Amino acid sequence: MLYGTAAYTGANPIGGGEGYVSQYTASMAHEAAESWTDLKKLAKEMGAQKEIWLPHDLTMPSGDDHPTFNPGVILASNRGVNGSPGAKIKNPYTVGGSGNYMSPIAYFSSNCVLSGLTLEGPGSFAATTDARTNAAARMASGARRVEIENCELLNFFQGGTYIPGGCPDPWNSDALTGRHWIHHSKIHGMQRHGFGYGVQVESGGSFLCEACIIYDCRHLICASQTAGTANFGNCYELRFNIFGEAWYRYYGTGPLHNNHQVDCHGFGASSAGWAGGYLWIHHNDFEANNTYDDAPNVSIRGIPHYECRVWANRTRYLHNGQSGVFGETSLNPAFTLRASDGGAWDGENNLSKYKMYVTDNQYGDWDTPAEPPDGPPIEVNTSDLRVTGLETSPVAVGDIYTITATVTNVGDGPGSADIVIGYMAGSTKRPLLTQTVDLEAGESAAVTRQATATTAGDWTFYAGSLTTILSVLNGMLVTTEVSNA
Amino acid sequence: MPDIQIVANIDVLIEMISATVRQVTFTVVRKTGATPLPGASISMGGLTAVTGDDGKAVVGPLETGTYTYTVTCPTFLDVTGELSL
């Protein structure tokens, strides 16, 4: 069993930046925004799948308001490519065009993509209770499947990104009508008392946050109750993230406090106040969260409408050995993850009664593994023989897995190539099988690798220029007994 | 004699009705260690249930017939099967 980000097998670095490979480039762009005026104009004019490139930094003018990007528009720069920080859009002002609230940098409609940019606000606001809140990047109300990749969001009143509604059915759909996707990004510096969220969802929205580094916010992740909202209410899945400290200044001028890193709150076990819908928290690293207080890693204040699952995370600090899960009488019933699984909730050692499943997490310090030695990429494709398909299916630990590469000779004559199937260790290729394939023109053949799956997790395999993910899961046994009802 | 015959018919009828309604008790355990698996979702015949701390869940009532069931739980491989009631 691999815990936390040790189970991460993606090719891109967690948090994005240096080494991130994006599909969006300057050469693919349809337009470039040289100025803030350009950007606002293009946001309204461009349509789906049209890419706007930002070649350099922009600053919002004083008193101006955000653009709203049409559905499907791509806004991109090159954060982390060849040492570039990527373009930054900054809003240095705490008052927007409305005269009351500061302006977010942008509203995004369904299927927009924000890639390789930095969105920066005027400050972390730890020393204020100013009411003119807003977030750096807002999803338009009810929008679906906005993607934020390889971005840095920092220094806004309310938070990094704000999601108002739009929960799909099912809640974790990754289709174009599905949940929002925030990945390989760095979010920090949102610390206003009462606000200050890395990612916030309200009014029945859903998002997947993965491979991000989030720190120095009042809460790193936040959701609230779901009464009267669409589909499954507020839902999130958090995986492969590195969660740093959550902290703020009490009422702006008081003492510094730590706060729980991941939050969801409702008002108890009633339909008027569920604490979220589906909440899945797995394979995350929770760094110590105790500079000012002994604050929990996860706090679910209320009962989820459907379920909260917390598994395969690792949490650095043991919190003075307090029990893992216990009730908070002030918002009863509640759940707090500090150290160790199981434990009591509201006096009962029966978490599943409250739809809480806290299992198989790792507690205490862990060693940071050394990076695997780099090896040269192994290219198996010749000009004529190509890997045209790569497939696998999920298996249980202990079962035999199969990786099948389909090799096709696309040339005009006979050809031969050594086909390699291997797995990705970070961005390094580790060959497992090499097989020579001889094919006549137009012929295809299968190369397969079979072995016993020993460790649960998602493993990326490659052959040629293709990759596929093998999910190795735990096994379960099911028995049934039929009786008269 | 006619009265007795009517009572007998009613008894038979009641037995036939109850015999067409079934329920299924599922027991789900981890393959490794065979410990109960709470929180596994079971769907069968349009009904759903979630296993408790003892790994058990009851699905029903269902009419007699043949059903396909699916058991799912995050990080576990789905299990599907067919059951005749």
Image: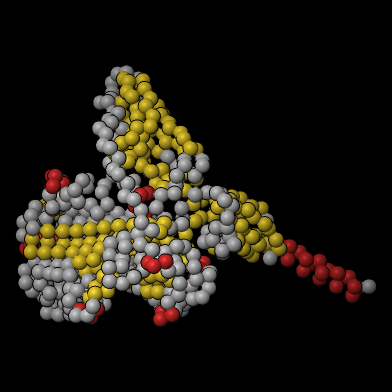
Q: Position of residue A217 (x, y in %)?
A: 25, 68
Residue that protrudes farthest toward the right in the picture: B1
Q: Position of residue B23 (x, y in %)?
A: 66, 62
At horizontal 64% and vertical 60% (from top left) the residue drawn is: B25
Q: Is residue A433 left or right of residue A19?
A: right
At horizontal 30% and vertical 40% (from top left) the residue drawn is: A372
Query: Residue A291 is drawn in which quadrant?
Result: bottom left
Residue that protrudes farthest toward the top in the picture: A414
At horizontal 41% and vertical 47% (from top left) the residue drawn is: A457
Count of marks, rendered view: 0
At horizontal 31% and vertical 32% (from top left) the residue drawn is: A464
Q: Is residue A241 left or right of residue A355?
A: left
Reply above or below: A466 against A479.
above
Q: Nearer the viewer, residue A38 or A210?
A: A210
Q: Position of residue A153 (x, y in %)?
A: 19, 62
Reply above or below: A331 against A30.
below
Instruction: Specify the quadrant that holds the C terminus of chain A.
Output: bottom right
Q: Which colour scheme appears in the figure?
A: secondary structure
Query: Residue A435 is drawn in which quadrant?
Result: top left
- Residue A101 visible in image: yes
Q: Nearer the viewer, residue B46 or A460?
A: A460
- Residue A195 visible in image: no
Q: Is residue B13 left or right of residue A246?
A: right
Q: Nearer the viewer, residue A109 or A45?
A: A109
Query: Residue A427 is drawn in which quadrant?
Result: top left
Q: Position of residue B57 (x, y in %)?
A: 59, 62
Reply above or below: B66 against A220.
above
